[in-house]
Amino acid sequence: MSYCRMSEGDVYMYWSITGGIICCGCSFSKDASAVFFSRSEAVTHIELHIQKGDKVPERAIKRLKEEIAEVGETWGLS
């Protein structure tokens, strides 16, 4: 399940079944992807992309915050 896709903006972030939330092809990471093990870290990371000028759908942050309220920071993220 993705939080946002490149077809919607400049960031592709998804929850990985192997653990964590992945920012795939991340312009901030020398390894091309960044991995987060809490939803708040992922929100902060998306906000950095927005500050940089990257387009990110508002629903990505909204969904992560809803998940924090419903299941917590790390449930299902390993």
Image (cartoon, rainbow, N blue to C red):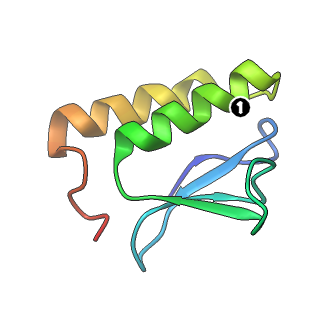
**Rendering coords of residue 32 (x, y %):** 77, 65
Side of 72 relative to 39 (left or right): left
Choose top left, top right, bottom left or bottom right for residue 9.
top right
Q: Residue at x 61, y 51 (%)?
A: 13
Side of 62 relative to 57 (left or right): left
Q: Residue at x 42, y 80 (%)?
A: 18
Q: Is residue 68 above or below residue 26?
A: above
**Rendering coords of residue 51 (x, y %):** 72, 19
Q: Residue at x 77, y 37 (%)?
A: 8
Tally of numbered tags? 1
Residues packed near mark 1 inside 10 Å, few (<14), some (14 to 19) or many (20 plus): some
Q: Residue at x 47, y 69 (%)?
A: 16
Secondary structure beneath dot 1 equals helix
Side of 34 relative to 16 (left or right): right
Side of 45 relative to 55 (left or right): left
Q: Is residue 4 above or below residue 29?
A: above
Residue type marked 1: His
Q: Is residue 13 above or below residue 69?
A: below
User: Which residue occupies the extreme bottom position in the image?
Assistant: 18
Choose top left, top right, bottom left or bottom right for residue 63.
top left
Choose top left, top right, bottom left or bottom right for residue 58.
top right
Q: Quadrant of the C terminus?
A: bottom left
**Rendering coords of residue 75 (x, y %):** 20, 58
Residue that label 1 marks = 49
